[in-house]
Every structure is written in C-alpha cells, then in structure tokens.
Amino acid sequence: MKTGTDTTAAIDFNFSWNSEYGTHHETYHAAKVNFWTDRLPDAIRQSLIGRRSGDVIESKFSAGELTPAFNRNNIFAVPRSQLNERLLRKNATVLRNGRFYPKGILSGLPGIFSANIQPFRCVGTDEKSIQANFNHSLSNHELRLDTTIKNIRAKETERGGTRTDWVETALTGPGMQVRWNGDATDFFSDNPFDRTDNSDDSAFYTRPRLVQHIDNQAIRVLTDMYATLLRSDMAILDLMSSWQSHLPENLHFKSISGLGLNGEELKHNPQLDAHTVHDLNKNPTLPFNTHQFDAVICALSVEYLIDPLTIFQEVARVLKPSGIFIVSFSNRWFPPKAINIWKEMHEFERVGLVMEYFLAEGSYEKLHTYSMRGLPRPTDDKYFPQMLFSDPIYLVWGQTR
C-alpha cells in the first residue's frame, strides 16, 4: 500500500540541526497523519505521497522555511510596569537573561492575554525594562528532516474534526536548549538548587522503590540510544543507579559499576558487576580512580542533584580521555526531591540546563542533544488510557577532552 489522500500513516519526523555548542536531533512520532486534512508544508506533503512503509525521505530547509523567519521587530522592549506582578510571582522572582517565561506575564502587548502560556525568551534586562524575544527558537537555524514512513492504513471514512499541523507540533520546544547570542543562560541565580524537601536524601530513599520511572516504550528508546552510543569493550559507571540500568542486553560490557542511594535496589540490578552506596548530595566526590571508566550514564536522576557542577567535574575526572557522559531524563520525578528550577522550566529548557552543566565544567566537547516525543503509550501500562502518549525522552551527552 502507498500513501495518498485515501490513507493515513504513522510517520517519524526526525529533525537535526547544529548550533555552535553541538548537534541536535529531535524526533516526533506522528501516530496518524491524514494527508487530506492535516497541515503539512507543500514540499513535505508532496514528498510523502506515493510512498511505502519503511521509506525514508531526506530534505533540507534553510532558516525560516519551516518556522517563521527571524525578525528583529519580534524583540520588544517591555517596561517593567507592564509585567503582570501576580503571574510573575508564580513563575519567577526576577526575569533572567536567556530564560523562557509564559507570554501571559506581559501586559499591554497586542494579542497577549494573561492565560497565554506560549514561551518567550528574556534576552536583556535593565532597571526600566526587559527585552522579550518572540522569535521561534529555531528561526535562524538550517534544518535537516529525515521523514520515515512507519505504517500505512486505508481510511474507512473521512470525517470532519481537528487538523493537526505536524511540523509546528514537532518543532514546538526544540531550539530552546541553546544559548542566546553566545551568552551563558542565567540558570544559576535565585537559589535554583533548593528543594521542597532538603532533608537527608538517604532517609528519603531508605525504602526500596522497585518501580519503573518511565513506561516500557520510553525504556526501549533509552536502551536503543545506549546501543547506538556505547560499545561492548567499555567499562561503564551507572551514576545514581537503581534496580534497572536500561543497558542493551546484546552488548557485553567489560564491566558495569553502579552508584546509588539504596543498597537493596542496587542488589536487584542484574546488570551490575559491582555497586557502591553513596550520597552525591552529601559528598559529590566520586569514590573511583581517575580515568577509570570509558562511559558514565545517568538516567532519570539529574534533576535531584544539588551540586551538579562539581559532580560533572568529578565525572570528567573518572572518565578516560574521549570518554562519554550520557545524561537522560523525562518529565516525571519525585517532586519533593527535584531541584526547584527543574520544576519551573519548559521541558526543552531543561535540556538547556543540562547543557550548561557540560559547558560550565569546560572538560567536555562534542555535545549532542536528542529528544523523542509522541510515541504511543503501551496499552498494558498502568496509566493507559488516561495517558495516551509514552513518556518523552531527552538525552544530553558529551565527550571528555
């Protein structure tokens, strides 16, 4: 069967782009693209018609072709008197350079209302005003698109309803993870590493939690990424480990060491060759030799670190030259123990925060980011059908110099 106006198809939209800090890959799974009603740029729509399942279509787009082009007139000087103080208190004490905030905190601008949660970027501040950038975060980036046809189905009927703009959906968020004009984003003001519960972590994690923190579909995505980035001859450190490491079973690593807070959880992890109980928030020094590991992974835990910059320095120390550090996360966590700034940010801004950890340390290069969103949630998952989509997965990784 071929794609056409009488069919629908599941499609992966795989965007890649470059910044001065690294390479970025964004994948959005569109479960049901209707070629008759849904919105697609003509060039993309025409490239998808007449295709079979498994086909991959490669395209390149100049800056401003798939997103609105960058326009200096979309950067506004907003007097501080026009900030909605009530909404501002819910989002930030002070607006910080490079950070994103909902447009609803601004008043007196055409088309902006208090319920508007679409983000803008603060790109400058002084005593009297702030500079609000309304441009799309990818407006000045060239984009490569690899479109993969996953499966095709004949339409039984054609009904009215919503029309999805798939490119807009896929590109909502990507781009927020990089700096503005080369300046470090101000993530580190306003006590960002405070938490709702600042008590000893070892007490919070005394009871083993042998539960999955993401669904099985998301785990497969993470495992597949590990299979792409890691090799069998590596000595691996699983940082902030638990009862699962999500490493691919078909790679037989030289060794896998786990460091975590709960000994019972670590003992239940069948992939670990050795484990160490260690509280990084109490002592960020890693109990390992310099240049001991080929790769360090940190899955679904970076949001709990209260001294991440020191820990990223320590990871660089225990990694061999050109060793890889892979950090992954989703949009689920234990709220009392997550750092405050993590809970305030857009999901792609969290990618930017982790990138700043890598950049601030100075020992890493060849940075990459990756996102996967839109996959269907497994029907046997306990949150289905209340949640139809799989947990999103975000990765940031780099190599030691």
Image: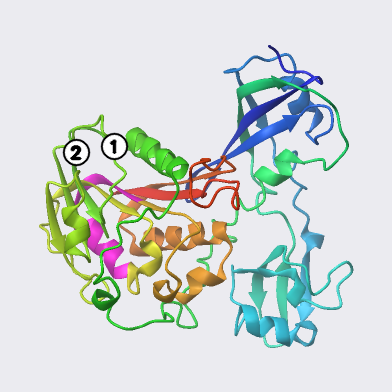
Could you tell me which residue is drawn at 23 percent across and 77 percent down? 282
Residue 376 disc label: none
From this view, report whether residue 58 is shown above or below residue 82: above
Residue contact between numbered discs 1 and 2, judged by CB atoms under 8 Å? yes
Q: How is the image coloured?
A: rainbow
Number of numbered callouts drawn: 2
Residue 230 disc label: 1
Crowd class of label 2 (few under 14; some 14 to 19; many from 20; radius 10 Å):
some
Could you tell me which residue is drawn at 49 percent across and 69 percent down? 342
SS of the residue under disc 1: loop
Question: Mark 2 belongs to which amino acid?
Answer: Met
In the image, is residue 324 part of the stretch drawn in magenta?
yes
Residue denoted by label 2: 234
Counting from the top left corner in percent of width and height, residue 361 is at 33, 63
Q: Quadrant of residue 73?
A: bottom right
Between 74 and 237, the one lying in front of the other is 237
For the magenta stretch, what is the residue range?
Answer: 309-326
